[in-house]
Amino acid sequence: MRQPGTLLPLIHDWPRPGYNPNQSRRPNCARLRLAPATAGQLSLRPLAQASGPSPALCWSAGAGAAAGAVPALLPAATMSCAALLGPRGSRLLGAAARPPRWSRRRSAGCEPPAGAAVRIGCASGFWGDTAAAVPQLLYGGKLDFLVFDYLSEITMSLLTAARARSPVLGYTPDFVTTAMAPYIKDIHRKGVRVISNAGGINPLACAAALQDVAKKADVDLKIAVVAGDDLMSEKENLKGAGITDLESGKPFPENIHSMNVYLGARPISRALDLGADIVVTGRCVDSGIVLGPLIHSFGWNRDEYDLLAAGSLAGHLIECGAQCTGGIFTDWHTVPDWHNIGFPVVECSSEGDFILSKPPDTGGLISFGTVAEQLVYELGNPQRYLLPDVTCDFSQVSITEIPGFDGGAVKVCGAKGSPPSTFYKVNATYLDGFRATAVCPVGGPKAVQKGKRTAEGILQRTRLIFSQLGYEDYSAVNIQILGSEDTYGPHARRSIDGGPREAVIWLAVHHKQKEAVEIFSREIAPAGTGMAPGLTGIVGGRPRVSPVLKPFFFYYPKRNVQIDLFLNGQHVEIFEEDLTFTSDEVVPFDPPKISSELKDLPSGPHTYRLEDLAYTRSGDKGNSANIGVIARHPLYYPYLKKTLTAQALENYFQHLLEREKPEQQLVTRYELPGIHGLNFVLKNSLGGGGIASLRSDPQGKALGQMLLDFQIKNVPDLKSLIE
């Protein structure tokens, strides 16, 4: 209970005149002071009379009154305020019992009552995610907010190409037709508010399509758009500004196709403040679609960095949907009912702690391992996770399993924050020729050899045609025979008796001219009659020729970006970022030194596969991949730190790394002691990454799986230590 003299918000009459949610403070609520009273009594007196009539508020609790009881004479409009005076209930994560839910939309209060929680579910982790997630979360998630994450660098490239074909395209239509249209009446009836970055390159067109759906369903919804991430109007000004790519250092391209800023969470929060039922954004940081509702709900200030980091962590964990509820888990065989896998729900408190769970009676699994894997997904330096609203330190985050939840639940805490930069990150794309990929199954004895010779024969024939027609050679080619473990390089297991009798040809090419790639596309089918026996077909038919839109990343000053907010198609205001709480201080990274305790670790005769001791997960950012490794038990962690050095991983994946300079170090290791984890960033490891890569794994999804066979040698019997 707060002591006499403590300020409390008056629940009715919010917001007060002059309230500006853009200011870095909480709403200017009318306030009450607990005046000194005799034992067993509380007296509430207004500090300042709010504008307009307000019911008198005075309650005297005599001796013996039940703690926290609300007397019948208290006006209904002020009951939640009186609830604040009762003994504070158990914290959100202190017990399996859940705190009351709260939504600013349903409450007249400017701040949630103590112990209240906001529930947010994520129904999409990418463009093309399952349609089963929406009804599962809508009817079983008990949500305040439903969020959808659709965008990646690859998706932005695809949407850019779509808008080039038609000005009404450039957003993800699945959001409108599949996710929202069938359920829009129930979303409205339940009062669930929706936030999505489905706007892609064209958020206004997405909102207009959504408005048509709402009109046909006869529901009145306020649909907001956050715009301003598109920087194409600045293209000419940027060409001579000396901008270089953050990864490669290459100069600003001439043929820029798109430029989009990664906006933050506060414009989303402001749109919700304006009463939006649905908020559609273009490019924003993925975690922002969760942090935005939390800022709106709890009034977190711009300088409450730990809270902003906690909200960003909640977003980071659920933004990829089922990836934190058992999807792509190392121990996949332990995850039940993939067909009905549960999608994630975070239940967040105003103090930043949260529980991650999923709807009851769904498949999947939430455990330390499934959530820890998602924590390291697409992570760089865990101590400097740069976002527009906060710089996060996730290195000391802890994940604790909570018993008693159907399908599992975890408590997550420990995120720390510091001021964000004065710059936004920008994802640009530029046209760099054309590509096509042929995928052809081949069967019979010596399938691998037949596949390789077929691919080489197709390239020889098309090069002959190129020379006859005056075309240059290919810019790049990639031959892989899937089934032969080509991607494993020197770690491949060589089969006996001629190898597998089934294989798949993966033949991808890149050329500056579209006509040359069209020649390649036409010359695949003739291999079925004029080359190796056993070629059974072409997956997907004749290979499709598509433009290559390569990513280009750079920083851009926040002060130069104008963010516009629209409501039901009308421009309502310009959102201005407050740069007061920002910092561009450069923090150097010093790789941790091997401590004496690691040097003195006991050795032994045993060898373990990494999978016996750890979980792994890998992801991508541009042409870099990351691999997170989490110890299955804290006692294994020192041995992982000692053995899995940056140099060890560079040696292991040398066949995938493209070194620009002989002495260049391409692997960096970071530590996450909070989850007993390591994170490795592998530069130049994806053959260009995304659409630009000709590899079968352009996003590094399998790198973590490949690392599971890494051998931890000369160690004692580690399993006996924990048994």
Image (cartoon, rainbow, N blue to C red):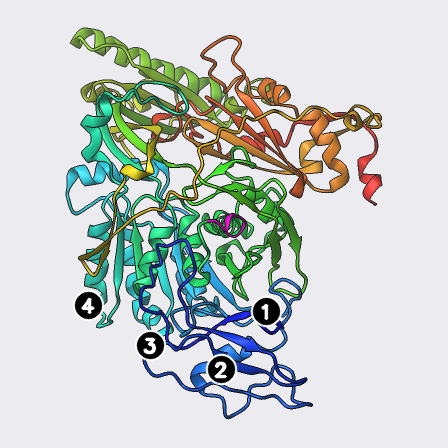
Residue 637, located in which quarter of the rendered image? Answer: top right
The kind of residue on which mark 3 rests is Ser
The part of the chain drawn in magenta is: 303-307
Tell which tag, 3 or 2, sits nearer the viewer.
Answer: 3
The kind of residue on which mark 1 rests is Arg
Tell which tag, 4 or 3, sits nearer the viewer.
Answer: 3
Disc marking residue 51 = 3
Distance from Cα at disc 4 to Cα at disc 2: 37 Å
Magenta stretch encompasses residue 304: yes
- Please give the residue where the numbered disc 4 appears in the rendered image: 215
Label 4: few (<14), some or many (≥20) within 10 Å? few
Q: Mark 4 or mark 2: which comes first in sequence? A: 2
Tell which tag, 1 or 4, sits nearer the viewer.
Answer: 1
Tell which tag, 1 or 3, sits nearer the viewer.
Answer: 3
User: SS for tag 2?
Assistant: helix
User: SS for tag 1?
Assistant: loop
- Please give the residue where the numbered disc 2 appears in the rendered image: 79
Point out the image quarter for the C terminus: top right
The kind of residue on which mark 4 rests is Lys
Tell which tag, 1 or 2, sits nearer the viewer.
Answer: 2
User: 27 or 717, which is in the foreground?
Assistant: 27
Disc marking residue 98 = 1
